[in-house]
Image: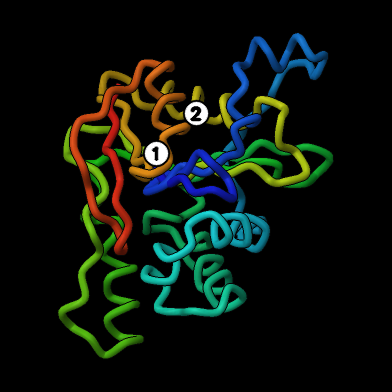
Amino acid sequence: MHNHEKAPLQAPFVCTKWEDTLSLREHQEKGSGKMTIRGARKEEAGEIAVLLTDMLGDIAKDQTAEQKPEKVSEVLASYIRSELNRFSYHNIWVKEIDKQVAGVIVCYAGDDAAIIDQPILEYVRAKTANNTFMLDPETEEGDYYVDSLVVHPAYRGQGIGSALLQKAEELSGDLRFTLNVELDNKGAASLYERQGFKREKKRDISGHHFWYMVK
């Protein structure tokens, strides 16, 4: 899963602001009521893509073969609308508030990684004319992986990140529940450790260094 300073919980980074990681109980005590989380829809691809573009940074650039944020978002949106790739709407869960996507989590089984990454690999190779391009491995077979977690800036501090993470853990079943956290994001690593994750090994993704964390 990715994490960076703009949104501290990330997947290859799980990205969320620290305040987004409030527990569900803390959120409910604030009077926000029951949280409803549902599968993403194709028509939300644009909204979701913008959130992921801002959170994923260099990883999104590598995986779309684009540099400008608006172009990265366009390609990510096309991925989201597709039926088979890591960013397909089938692998995304959202928290909706007032008809707006307030938070997003991308998650899938590590056993499926090679299959769902193939369309992205083929797109980037065709776009760049580089047939040797490879995506950096982010997860393992036998694991359930949180690729990305991001909360819209307007809705941070409401426990949305924690609720989405809880949803993904429910989906993981008997598989190991995993994510990636950047090495220099010590706050995020400590947060996940308090939630039961352990640092298993280091991993490099798109030139950034991560802890692969397992629960």
Q: Amino acid at mark 1?
A: Val
Residue beneath the point at 53% across and 41% down:
8
Label 1 packing within 10 angstroms: few (<14), some (14-19), many (20+): many
Mark 2 residue crowding within 10 angstroms, few (<14) / some (14–19) / many (20+): some
Question: In the picture shown, does residue 64 fall above or below 113?
Answer: below
Looking at the picture, tell me which residue is in the foreground, 175 or 25.
Answer: 25
**Percent of width and height locating residue 67:** 49, 79
Give the residue at x 58% y 45%. Answer: 7
Q: Residue at x 28, y 75 (%)?
A: 122
Examine the image and state in which quarter residue 59 appears. Answer: bottom left
Determine which quarter of the picture holds residue 84: bottom left
Against 18, residue 137 (above or below) is below
Identify the element where label 1 is drawn: strand
User: Which of pointers 2 and 1 lies earlier in the amino acid sequence?
Assistant: 1
Q: Are marks 2 and 1 in contact (CB under 8 Å)?
A: yes
Amino acid found under the numbered disc labelled 2: Leu
Q: Is residue 164 left or right of residue 134?
A: right
Distance CA(mark 2)–CA(mark 1): 8 Å
Which percent across, then down, holds residue 41? 61, 50
Q: Residue 44: percent from the left, percent from the top?
A: 66, 55
Name the residue at the bottom extreme.
129
**Would you say 136 lies left or right of 197 here?**
left
Which residue is denoted by mark 2 in the rendering? Answer: 165
Q: Nearer the viewer, residue 65 or 200?
A: 200
- Tell me the quarter of the image containing the C terminus: top left
Residue drawn at (51%, 73%) of the image:
75
Residue 128 in the image, given as x and y percentages of width and height: 32, 87
Q: Specify the color scheme.
A: rainbow
Where is mark 1, residue-wise? Answer: 146
Q: Is residue 158 visible?
A: yes
The quarter in which the N terminus is drawn is: top left
